[in-house]
């Protein structure tokens, strides 16, 4: 069994400990474990391939535990190396409207003006502070997303 780690002092220690516990618990003396820090995209891709192989492992098996550990270290690598772009405020509104099956008419009832809703969704008008408050409360969007600057058309 090959495990690839991303360096994080505490994570490295915890994962090494978990592996020793798992080996003792399942008594897999033949199970060989090599720990390696993920340093490159290639190593990351290898870890992803291995994760795909063991993803549907039987519950309670050593392979399931390997999958869980791989998930943790892959997530750690992604958090450190793959930036997630900030969402566009208007796209976030449209997404939440779609998720909650909300019409523009229903959004107009929240914001108070159908004409403004159309202008906002088409990026022809900026959100006001009052609108941001109402959208945050009714669509359950963080205000931090809604206050981001976006280009007008």
Image (cartoon, rainbow, N blue to C red):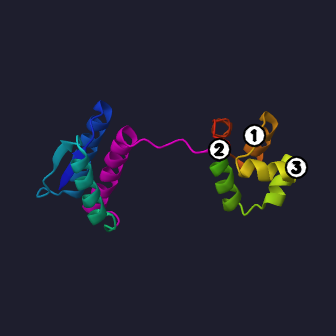
- Is 107 left or right of 38, judged from the image as shown? right
Whichever of callouts 2 and 1 sits on the residue coming sooner in the sequence is: 2
Q: Looking at the image, do the residues carrying marks 2 and 1 touch, with CB atoms under 8 Å apart? A: yes
Q: Secondary structure at mark 3?
A: loop
Magenta span: helix, strand or loop, mainly? helix
Give me the C-alpha separation between circle 2 and circle 1: 9 Å
Q: Position of residue 37 (x, y in %)?
A: 21, 40
Q: Secondary structure at mark 1?
A: loop
What residue did someone put label 2 on?
89
Asked whether residue 24 is in view, the answer is no
- Is 113 left or right of 135, judged from the image as shown? right
Is-magenta flag for residue 73? Answer: yes
Is-magenta flag for residue 26? Answer: no
Residue extending farthest front? 153
Quadrant of the rendering where the N terminus is positioned: bottom left
What residue did someone put label 3 on?
113
Q: Residue at x 49, y 43 (%)?
A: 85
Whichever of callouts 2 and 3 sits on the residue coming sooner in the sequence is: 2
Please report the bounds of the magenta region as a residue range.
Answer: 59-88
Give me the C-alpha separation between circle 2 and circle 3: 19 Å
What residue did someone put label 1 on?
127
Q: Looking at the image, do the residues carrying marks 2 and 3 touch, with CB atoms under 8 Å apart? A: no
Q: Position of residue 12 (x, y in %)?
A: 27, 37
Q: Callout 1: 10 Å neighbours few (<14), some, many (20+)?
A: many
Give me the C-alpha separation between circle 1 and circle 3: 12 Å
């Amino acid at each position: 069994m090959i495990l690839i780690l991303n360096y994080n002092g505490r994570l490295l220690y915890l994962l090494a400990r978990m592996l020793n516990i798992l080996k003792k618990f399942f008594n897999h003396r033949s199970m060989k474990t090599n720990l390696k820090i993920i340093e490159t995209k290639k190593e990351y891709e290898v870890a992803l391939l291995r994760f795909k192989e063991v993803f549907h492992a039987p519950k309670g098996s050593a392979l399931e535990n390997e999958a869980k550990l791989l998930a943790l270290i892959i997530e750690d690598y992604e958090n450190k190396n793959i930036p997630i772009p900030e969402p566009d405020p208007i796209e976030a509104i449209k997404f939440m409207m779609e998720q909650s099956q909300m019409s523009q008419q229903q959004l107009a009832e929240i914001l108070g003006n159908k004409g403004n809703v159309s202008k906002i969704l088409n990026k022809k008008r900026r959100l006001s502070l009052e609108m941001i408050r109402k959208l945050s409360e009714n669509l359950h969007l963080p205000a931090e997303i809604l206050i981001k600057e976006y280009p007008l058309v």
